[in-house]
Image: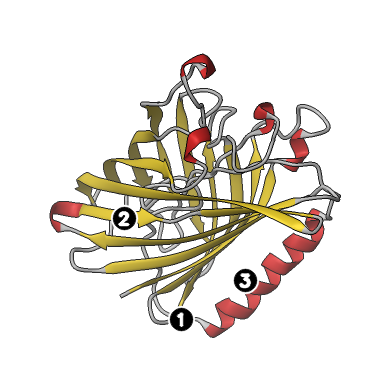
């Protein structure tokens, strides 16, 4: 992806978040390493402090981190969220940040409609470059059997650049998903699985700009494990070495007044291949609230 500056296409990454999923446009760079243990201690501290202050039953999630769940917003409800991601570790000369406000509106028949406005800012020594996108998206939960703990959903997202358009094309993602809730008291886990695919993405650089690199299809997996009445251990994964290919473990904390806080660490699927791959990792935190 070209974002107003020159990058190595082999290291292009994209984390695109949607009401239906949170995939990713990240541009990776070499930066100095920062101890992951420090991040883990911060997350643990947040879990302890907020879980003591918060109360009430758990809330359904439209997403975990990057992948969708089979949940949809209730009809007439509005879900607003702000995501912050920081490239970690870094390089000594640059670091990429993502700021992503997004909104989801619940429709009839277990439909939801959303829009994201991710803004990617890469900071250099005394300089920076920014790329913005708009991502309309939708999801439909077409099957729900609460007694069996099974639900199914389909959805999609369209990604279009708002600037630097001469170096990028638009493309879409579609997916299907099934979830299974284990009926085991208040602490039974829930699992998610399904396929995804990229459509209308230019794959030939000789025919025009290519902004989605790597494999065009794969699987999505998710796991939610309640640990306390307001705290869950969660993880999700997009397969494939592409802009969606990340494994993200973390915690999810239900806050008072229909709030939600998630914090985790996204690890690129190519993060163990060579010396540069470890830079394709991001600290990930978001806050959401339902009105």
For label 1, the crowd category at 10 Å Cα-Cα, with few meaning under 14, some 14 to 19 and many 20 or more, is: some
Q: SS for tag 2?
A: strand
- The residue sitting at 69% across, 45% down in the picture is 281
Real-space CA distance between mark 2 and mark 1, rounded to the nearest whole angstrom: 28 Å
| Mark 2 or mark 3: whose residue is earlier in sequence | 3
Q: SS for tag 3?
A: helix
Q: Quadrant of the C terminus?
A: bottom left
Q: Is residue 69 visible?
A: no
- The residue sitting at 18% across, 58% down in the picture is 107
Q: Position of residue 113 (x, y in %)?
A: 26, 54
> Are dots 2 and 1 in contact, CB under 8 Å?
no
| Mark 3 or mark 1: whose residue is earlier in sequence | 3
Q: Which residue is mark 2?
A: 114
Query: Of the numbered discs in the image, which one, if any, rests on residue 47?
Result: 3
Q: Which residue is mark 1?
A: 55
User: Above or below — where is 118 with respect to 26?
Assistant: below
Real-space CA distance between mark 3 and mark 1, rounded to the nearest whole angstrom: 13 Å
Q: Which picture quadrant has residue 277? A: top right
Q: Quadrant of the N terminus?
A: top right
Q: Is residue 35 left or right of residue 17?
A: right
For label 2, the crowd category at 10 Å Cα-Cα, with few meaning under 14, some 14 to 19 and many 20 or more, is: many
Residue that sits furthest to the front in the current view: 166
Query: Of the numbered discs in the image, which one, if any, rests on residue 266?
Result: none
Q: SS for tag 1?
A: loop
Q: Is residue 71 or residue 56 the one in the foreground? A: 71
Q: Position of residue 142 (x, y in %)?
A: 19, 43
């Amino acid at each position: 992806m070209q974002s107003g500056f020159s990058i190595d296409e082999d290291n292009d990454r994209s984390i695109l978040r949607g009401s239906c999923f949170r995939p990713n446009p990240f541009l990776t760079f070499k930066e100095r390493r920062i101890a992951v243990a420090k991040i883990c201690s911060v997350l643990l501290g947040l879990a302890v402090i907020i879980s003591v202050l918060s109360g009430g039953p758990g809330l359904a999630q439209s997403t975990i981190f990057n992948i969708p769940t089979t949940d949809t917003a209730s009809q007439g409800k509005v879900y607003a969220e702000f995501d912050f991601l920081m490239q970690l570790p870094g390089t000594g000369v640059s670091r990429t940040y993502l700021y992503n406000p997004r909104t989801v509106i619940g429709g009839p028949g277990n439909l939801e409609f959303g829009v994201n406005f991710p803004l990617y800012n890469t900071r250099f020594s005394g300089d920076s470059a920014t790329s913005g996108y708009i991502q309309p998206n939708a999801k439909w939960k077409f099957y729900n059997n609460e007694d069996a703990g099974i639900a199914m959903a389909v959805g999609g997202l369209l990604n279009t650049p708002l600037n630097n358009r001469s170096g990028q094309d638009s493309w879409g993602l579609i997916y299907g998903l099934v979830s299974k809730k284990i009926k085991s008291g208040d602490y039974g886990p829930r699992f998610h699985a399904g396929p995804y695919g990229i459509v209308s993405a230019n794959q030939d650089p000789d025919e025009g700009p290519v902004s989605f690199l790597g494999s065009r299809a794969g699987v999505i997996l998710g796991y939610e494990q309640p640990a306390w009445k307001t705290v869950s251990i969660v993880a999700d994964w997009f397969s494939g070495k592409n802009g969606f290919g990340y494994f993200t473990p973390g915690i999810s904390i239900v806050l008072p007044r229909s709030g939600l806080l998630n914090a985790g660490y996204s690890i690129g699927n190519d993060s163990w291949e060579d010396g540069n791959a470890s830079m394709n990792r991001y600290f990930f935190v978001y806050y959401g609230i339902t009105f």
